[in-house]
Amino acid sequence: MINSPDSMFAPMIADEAQTMTRLRDQLAAGAEAGELLDVAYTTVDSPVGTLLLAATDQGLVRVAYELENHDQVLQALADRVSPRLLRAPRRLDQVAWQLAEYFERQRRDFVLPLDFRLSHGFRRQVLARLVMIDYGRTETYLQVAAATGHPRAVRAVGSACATNPLPVIVPCHRVLRSDGKLGGYVGGLDNKAALLALEAGN
Amino acid sequence: MKRPFEEMVVQHGPTVLRVCRAVLARPDADDAWSETFLAALRAYPDLPETANVKAWLITIAHHKAIDALRAQSRRAVPVAEIAESSFTTDAWEPSDQILWAALRALPTKQRQAVAYHYLAGLPYAEVATIIGGSTDAARRAANDGIRNLRRSYHNSDQLVSHEGTQS
């Protein structure tokens, strides 16, 4: 006998998972078409772990390592950009493609619209400087500070790198300490070393 | 601090789908789901942080379903007949067809009360807010609906196979 209504309804939608996948894809497309998708995100596998990619209609706004905790990153995007946020991989297709090429050593420069709204003031100035460091090259925190016109702001450069919202794409991994040591990295030192090795062709 | 909308889709999407399918036949049910979540996405930034998101979504779905039923009645036969006839042409869920059919064949209030209370898990007070009338009336409608469902369900050959899928 089936006594509880709950158990009676338990097997109701056998194809629920597939249907939900289809409906969620439709929702993402409908939201994009209706200009309701303030933040689209996806995750991609890479040699430096799973990367979260998020974009506004202006461009790529966030790249996050697992170390940063993707749930917290999404919550921060909801707070600081908009809670109209959906997993919608299509907006990130170009980014995912270029990253895959980069990790296969088929690409040295990213050609992508970037949205720097998560970074302000001096930190944003530093990021603008970082994108000028070429693939396979490195600079010291001191050199970057000097290049921004604030040679004594070495620590501030360090914190700009530590809070870089677009790691890998904006290459804060190419900034080292003056003594040649790695310094810090938002994605963990192993990943910083891995990116530098990749670019050095090792 | 408002949660990302994606979490609302993951958390409540399946429940809203069940409710839509309980009230509407496919593909109208799936369309109602899509319209519900698009409307919710539009309004989400203005939703008070203390709001019960599930009840809010079910309320939107309720209105979308009413719109769909009205559109059906404009297209062809009266709504009451649609409820009886639409499931017979449904090709999906063969093993659960009888339960879905029985559910959609219930009188509107009973169907809504069963869907919102038993499928969505809303308390009767919130069910009453959505469908109108008192909390007691919502409880009675749900109880009547379950009694009617049991009657049609137990008469079917599907009972044994469903019991096999339990636990």
Image (cartoon, coloured by chain):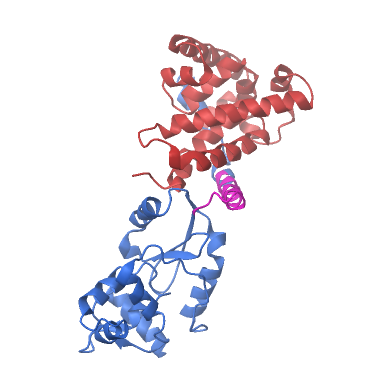
Chain colours: A blue, B red
* Picture residue at 53% right of the left edge, 18% below the top: B131
Q: In the picture provided, is B69 more to the left or to the right than A96?
A: right
Q: Position of residue A60 (x, y in %)?
A: 47, 66
Note whether residue B19 is visible.
no
Q: In the picture provided, is B106 more to the left or to the right than A87?
A: right
Q: Position of residue A69 (x, y in %)?
A: 32, 59
Residue A200 image-quadrant placement? bottom left
Q: Position of residue B43 (x, y in %)?
A: 50, 39
- Work out whether residue A123 or residue A92 is closer to the camera in this orientation and state it: A123
- Work out whether residue A98 or residue B50 is closer to the camera in this orientation and state it: B50
Predominant secondary structure in magenta? helix
* Picture residue at 39% right of the left edge, 85% below the top: A133
- Work out whether residue A74 or residue B155 is closer to the camera in this orientation and state it: A74
* Picture residue at 46% right of the left edge, 13% below the top: B139
Note whether residue B63 is visible.
yes
User: Is residue A37 located in the magenta-colored stretch of the structure?
Assistant: yes
- Work out whether residue B91 or residue B37 is closer to the camera in this orientation and state it: B37
* Picture residue at 30% right of the left edge, 72% below the top: A122
Residue A20 image-quadrant placement? top right
| Vertical position of residue B87 compared to residue A118: above or below | above
Question: Which span of residues is magenta-colored?
Answer: A20-38
Quarter of the image with the C terminus of chain A in it: bottom left
- Residue found at the very far front of the displayed protein: A149
Q: How many marks?
A: 0
User: Is residue A72 located in the magenta-colored stretch of the structure?
Assistant: no
Q: Position of residue B104 (x, y in %)?
A: 63, 22
